[in-house]
Image (cartoon, grey):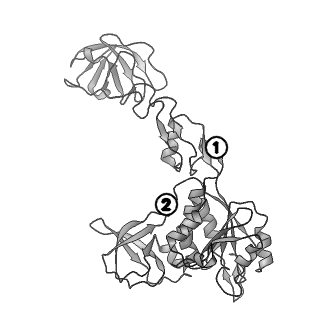
Amino acid sequence: MTLTTLKNLTVEDARARILDGAVRLDVETVALADSLGRVLAQSVTAARPQPPFDASAMDGWAIRRADYAPGKAFAIAGESAAGKAYPRAVQADQAVRIFTGAPIPAGADLVVIQEEAVRDGDTVRFDAGEAPKSNSRAAGGDFQAGDVLLEPGVVIDPWRLSLLASAGLGEVAVARRPRVAILATGDELVAPGASPRPDQIFESGSFSLVALVQAWGGEAFRLTAAADDANAIAAAVQPVDVDLIVTIGGASVGDHDLVKPALKTLGLELSVETVALRPGKPTWSGHLTDGRRVLGLPGNPASALVCAELFLRPLLAALAGGDAEVRLVPARLAEPLPSTGPREHWMRAALSVDPEGRTIARPFPDQDSSLVGVFARADALLRRRAGAAAASANDIVDVLPLRRG
C-alpha cells in the first residue's frame, strides 16, 4: 500500500480501513449489577420458563370454570399470594383468594376479579357475566426454558438488564471495554482552570473525547506530553497499555505538526493519511509495531468531534463486539444550501418536528470548525455528499442524530 493511496479517502473508505481487523476484545464475566452499558459476548438461554407457573393477572378468586355460575356460592378454601402458593388442588365449588402474580392453584382455571365478588363469611359469590375472562398468565408466557433471550453483540441497556435478571442470571459474559489513551498536543493549549497567556487557548478536545469514549462503552484517560516535541510525544505514548491511542492536533502539514513523526519512531504504519471530509481532512489512522491502534483527529474541537462520531464511535463498537454501523436517518431541509465542493461536508444542525410530524434539519449558519458553541447546540450532523448540487428547502437529506444525555 503506497502513501498516495492513503490520501483523500472517502468517509466510507476511511472508516473501512480504520475498522479493518477490529474484532471483539477479550471476554470477561461481570456481576449483573455491573453489566449496564456493556456488550454481551455470549448468547443467553433461559434455564426455566417465565413465569415458571400459571399466575394470576389480577387480585381476585381462583375457581374451576366448570363450577362457575352467576350468583352461585363457593366455599373459601384458602389463599394464594406471591411467594406463598396455596398448597392443594381446588375442589368442586371451592374458591381460593388469590393476588396478582401468585400461582394459580392446581385444578383452578379461572380467576374472578375481586370487583365481581361478594364475600359473606366463609363463602363468596360472583357476578362476572356468563363468560368471564380467565385473568391468568400462562407458564412460559414471557419465555420458555431453552429460549435464546439475547444474542452476542447487543448492548445491555436497562430493559435488557431486566430481562437478564428475570432469567435469574447473577453474572454475564461481556466484552472487555476498549482502553483508550487520549493525547492533545500544541504549545497553544492550556488546561481548563489554569491561567493562559494571551497567545494560548483552553484545551477542550481531550475532555470531551474522554467523556465520549466512556459514553460509548470504553475506558479512557488523558495523556500529557512533557513538551510539544517529537521526543516528548513518543515518550508519553510509548509505555501506555491500551488498545487505542487517540491524538488531537499535530497532524496537518505545518512545521509544528509532530505527532506522526513522533509515532513513526514507535513503528507507526499508516492506513489512512487524509480524508476528503469537511471538517476533518487531517484525520488519519494506523498501527504501532506492538499492535496498538492509533487514530489521529484534527486539532480544531468541532472537527475532532465530527470525526469522533464518524470514526471513533464505530471503532469502539467493533472492539467491543457490538454494532459498528453508522446509521443515518432522513430529514427535510429547512432552508436552501449551496452546492458542495470536492469534500464531503458534515454540517452541525438542529432537528425539529413540523406539524405534520416530519423531521426538519436546520444547519447552523456558521460551520467554522473551531466553534464548540455551535456543537453544544446541535443535535445532529447533516451529510452533504462531495460534489452535491445546490439543495432546496424541503429536500430530503441524511442526518446522523447525536446521542444527547
Please give the residue where the numbered disc 1 appears in the rendered image: 30
Q: Residue at x 63, y 77 (%)?
A: 3
Q: How far apart are the alpha carbons under marks 1 and 2? A: 26 Å
Q: Which residue lies furthest to the top in this view?
A: 92
Which amino acid, by three-letter code, is at mark 2? Glu
Q: Which secondary structure, mark 1?
A: strand
Total number of numbered discs in the rendering: 2
Q: How crowded is mark 2: few (under 14 residues within 10 Å), some or many (20 or more)?
A: few
**Relative to 322, 328 lies left or right:** left
In this view of the protein, can residue 225 be seen by the observer?
A: no
Query: Observer-nearest residue: 293 or 228?
Result: 293
Using the rendered view, name the quadrant where residue 293 is placed: bottom right
Which mark lies nearer to you, 1 or 2? Answer: 2
Query: What percent of the width, then of the height, locates residue 385?
Result: 43, 77
Residue 49 in view here: yes
Q: In which quarter of the image is residue 394?
A: bottom left
Q: Look at 29% across and 11% down and name the residue there.
A: 93
- The residue identified by callout 2 is 325
Dot 2 falls on a residue whose secondary structure is loop
- x%, y% of residue 267? 75, 70
Amino acid carrying label 1: it is Val
Residue name at image x 35 percent, y 69 percent:
331
The quadrant in which residue 141 appears is top left
